[in-house]
Amino acid sequence: MNLHVENISVELEKKTILRDVSLTVRSGEFVGLIGPNGSGKSTLLKSIYRALEPRSGFISLDGADVYELTARQNAQRMAVVRQESSIEFDFTVMEIVMMGRSPHKRLFQTDTPADSRICEEALERVGMQAYASRSFFSLSGGEKQRVLIARALVQQAEFLVLDEPTNHLDVRYQLQVMDLVKTLGITVFSSLHDLNIAAMYCDRLYVIRDGELVASGTPEEVLEPGLIRDVFGVETEVVTHPITGKKHVYFFSEAVRVQQSRQEVKAL
Ligand SMILES: Nc1ncnc2c1ncn2[C@@H]1O[C@H](COP(=O)(O)OP(=O)(O)OP(=O)(O)O)[C@@H](O)[C@H]1O
């Protein structure tokens, strides 16, 4: 499934949030979106999953305008894991995951044993099978996140949109969730805060700052100290990881830099 975003602009409360954004995610690619807080990552993803129609521009999945598809057609093509859960009423974990099957059902069609099996498998893949009958509201942030990923999995869509999927997850589940998404072999577009996770898992990255894309390329091309300084305002050292061969970013806090320059002055 190919995603094309062409020249989209979004304005909210008379403020331009996205300016002339164009990008492509090709079939089977895992593409990351990185940028500082408030740079427009969620807004761009919302435009793609139709929660926020852009003022101008065009978004298509395999050539079909996403805003022309019915909600059902769209849900068969695209699954979404949002940053904040939109679950308003308390359901069990299994009921939440089962909701992901609805694009594959007719109106009022009941859940089949096959649906239950698919949901159980998805819960197992995210390590939440023991929680099937628990209330969703009683879960921790990380547990909720894993359940929402299971719900996206059972939708069996070919295109997955993730808004900071590792938010709330401890390091083990960060890696587990990213490994899982990677092994699905489907097309993924994901916003990410952790640059090292982005380097490990993404085939390509887009960098957004103040609502505009400012760089794109492979993690090897994009993740370099000058760009990270310009976009995130932090100093880094970027090395090639000796085991994975991927880029690895070390960050220097302002306090460490001040201490280091004092030591350098003393040594003179
Ligand atoms: N409904 C709204 N009305 C006005 N401004 C909004 C609205 N929603 C978002 N914004 C603004 O748009 C900008 C981009 O927000 P967005 O949530 O897309 O950023 P983000 O890159 O996802 O941030 P974060 O990393 O903090 O999640 C921010 O300045 C935000 O305050």
Image (cartoon, rainbow, N blue to C red):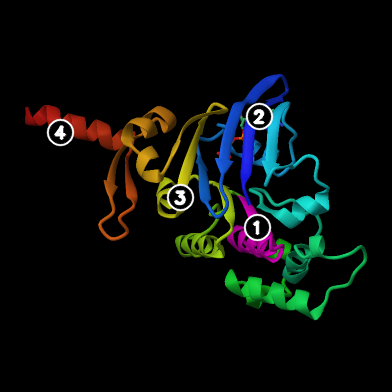
Taking the image as shown, residue 41 lies to the left or right of residue 223, namely right
For discs 2 and 4, the disc positioned in front in the rendered view: 2
For discs 1 and 4, the disc positioned in front in the rendered view: 1
Taking the image as shown, residue 232 lies to the left or right of residue 14, namely left
| Residue shown at the point (65%, 61%) measured from the top left | 144
Q: Quadrant of the C terminus?
A: top left
| Kind of residue indicated by mark 3 | Asp
Say the numbered circle drawn on residue 16: none
Say the numbered circle drawn on residue 203: 3
Residue contact at pointers 2 and 4, CB within 8 angstroms = no
Residue designated by label 2: 8
Taking the image as shown, residue 173 lies to the left or right of residue 199, namely right
Give the percent coordinates (x, y) of residue 64. Answer: 73, 43
Whole-angstrom CA distance, mark 2 to mark 1, is 23 Å
How crowded pointer 3 is (Cα within 10 Å; few <14, some 14-19, many 20+) is rated as some
Residue designated by label 1: 158
The residue stretch that appears in magenta: 139-161
| Kind of residue indicated by mark 2 | Ile
Whole-angstrom CA distance, mark 2 to mark 3, is 23 Å
In the rendered image, is residue 90 in sight?
Answer: no
Give the percent coordinates (x, y) of residue 159. Answer: 64, 53
| Kind of residue indicated by mark 4 | Gln
Q: Secondary structure at mark 1?
A: loop
| Kind of residue indicated by mark 1 | Glu
First in sequence: mark 2 vs mark 1:
2
Give the percent coordinates (x, y) of residue 115. Answer: 77, 74
Residue designated by label 4: 263
Q: Relative to 146, is 66 above or below?
A: above
